Amino acid sequence: MISVLGIRHHGPGSARAVRAELERMRPDAILIEGPPEADPLVALAPDCEPPVALLAHVPGSSRAAFWPFAVFSPEWQAILYGTRNGVPTRFCDLPAATTLATEREEDGDRDPLGELAAAAGYDDAERWWEDVVEHRGDTPFEVVAEAMAAVRDGYVPGEREAAREAHMRRTIRAAQKEGFERIAVICGAWHVPALTTMPPAAQDNALLRGLPKVKAELTWVPWTYGRLASWSGYGAGITSPGWYHHLFDAPDRPVERWLTAAAGVLREEGLPVSSAHVIESVRLAGTLATLRGRPLAGLGEVTEAARAVLCEGDGLPVELIERRMVVGDRLGHVADGTPMVPLQRDLREQQRKLRLKPEALRREHDLDLRKPLDLGRSHLLHRLRLFGVEWGTPVESRGKGTFRESWSLMWRPEDDLTLIESAALGITVEAAATQRALDLAAASGPTSGPASSGIASAGGGPSLGELAGLVEKCLLAELPGALPGVLAALSARAALDTDVTRLMAALPAMVRAHRYGDVRGTPAEGLAVIVRSMLDRVCVGLPVAVTALDDEAAAALLGHVDAVHAAVALMAEADRGRWLATLLTLCERDGLHGLIAGRLTRILLDAGELDDAAGRMARATSRGNGPARSAAWIEGFLSGGGLLLVHDPRLLGLVDAWLSALPAEQFVEVLPLLRRTFGGFAVPERRAIGQRLRAEGGGDGEQPERDLDEPRAAAAERTVLAILGRAHG
């Protein structure tokens, strides 16, 4: 006897029905839609915690495919039944070796559920399936098979779909030849008609003959409900996995339990939700279901009830419920005996040692690098990022000092695939990161490596700035095995690069890397020599670079000057002196772009190298200079902030006098530059400047006299006095 149970992938009603049907029929063999190479992995399923997925990948390639399962997936319940009862359980779909060797083809362009829903008067296939299947106590497999046969009448499957169904039938025949008498086949409802009517075996063999194949390896990997909700492959269309999990776990009183849990979520966020709110929301959900002719309130009804009652019409709490409950943040776990590449096993051991548990929910972690545990966590996260595992993302630290780091951590199922793809780099995380860094420095690494490493090797290898950033990454990740090779590549590239702007772009990262080597206790021999050499070349080349610049080029160069100046502040006193001497020499030159001249003057003034800033501003704003150049000079001079004008009345007076003397036409010409300059000041700075100018021009803050309309003022005075209850004198 062959029983073909047509199900909906990830349907909780189907899952309960499959479990009940297997208990009733007691099969001696179970065949499940999925890749047959995964048969040896079935025994590991009871020790896995869903959601999990079967991962099939081609070694040395980025080609991969996933078959995800949740606890409410009918296939998962069939696997659990088979393993717990000693029933041979196998997969019967097209082999993964063939699936990965061919371009994915959509299995037809028809929507069977949509057609059945439309025939029943529904405009939403999801809602129709919920009403006729998920909200029932069982799934009428015979009715589903009959409905699918009607929908498939006259349908001609595509080449890939025909091959899939032919392989399913071949597996059924093989099970019969082995002597199994009660065979249960669990597959998508769409395939039921193709498996209940068996054509000659020769016809199926002809469809399967000559199909391409590749070497494929399979394993279990953790999955997430967020990934399940956005998945577009096997079992697509589940937009609310958290809701379906709830329906599977709470078949009795699901609406009451759901809204009670939603109230708990809102209370955790400090929102006042009472038991009366829950009772009223349950009533509203039931009323909406009755008005719409539904047997039970669905996700749409409970969401509307939560919005109206629990959230009092506010959309933000509803989004919280949808994120935490409708989709969910559940992350699965695989069994300890699951096949893994050595790199995965090393990472799992590092996670245990450092007490960093991978989670699907994004969490913030603040690290104090003076503590060995936190320093080890930082090294691990930086190493993973080098070969594309973005488990942790650096965020702005909430603490102060170089010993603080803040990270945002969230594990994604794709990270396991990246680990498998990177297995050839090394058997430990440190070894893999070291090899990846060396490959990037040499611009000869594996072309299939993760693109997120940030190094573009096209067009002659990584740039000087990219190599400088790579040195910084190696120090942050504590990769002493990679540093010599990366530093050698950097030194060679720096010696050949004659573009001063590229040198200036690379220098800040190099200075930070040298500083990190000091504070983290990971010195990089030779780095200081390279940094000083680059600074020397910047000082020599900068006078040429500032010549004949237009406005756009001047603004770009100014950004490099500011970045280098901030970096030089971290260097030795002699290096800072060399840099400031270069800027002072430039500041004395004629013909500099106004933006550059003004900014250099401000840098030197703040550094204590100038005592004639007022005289320089007076010359820059004199009538001998055009208004556009004067405005650019002031923009550069004030780009460091406006407090200088508050505390130096002479400079403020010079700016005020220059502006007051401009003719109307010239004032309009420079107004955009002035608005950009003063608009960049903090609000308290602008307010202080305005108060200082008013005090200077109004005589201790006294307001100038104004002409008054006495009769109109008298009428207003009488009204005010009457309001105050005072007689008009």
Image (cartoon, rainbow, N blue to C red):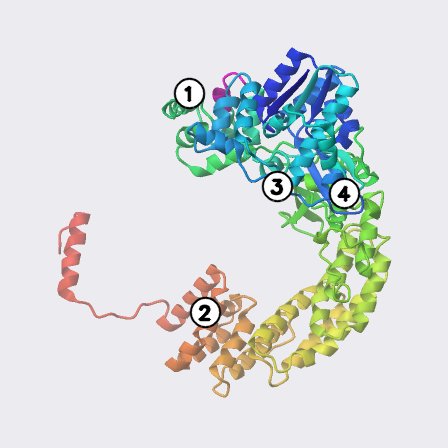
Is any atom of residue 558 visible in this view? yes
Rounded to the nearest angstrom, the CA distance separating label 3 from label 2 is 57 Å
Rounded to the nearest angstrom, the CA distance separating label 2 from label 1 is 58 Å
Front residue of 629 and 242: 242
Counting from the top left corner in percent of width and height, residue 613 is at 57, 77
Q: Earlier in the sequence, mark 3 or mark 1?
A: 3
- The numbered mark at residue 279 is 1
Q: Which residue is mark 3?
A: 106
Q: Earlier in the sequence, mark 4 or mark 3?
A: 3
Q: Secondary structure at mark 4?
A: loop
The amino acid marked with disc number 2 is Arg
The amino acid marked with disc number 3 is Glu
Q: Is residue 677 magenta?
A: no
Q: Secondary structure at mark 3?
A: loop
Q: Which residue appears at 73% of the width and 76% of the height?
A: 539
User: Which of the two marks, 4 or 2, is nearer to us in this view?
Assistant: 4
Q: Earlier in the sequence, mark 1 or mark 4?
A: 4
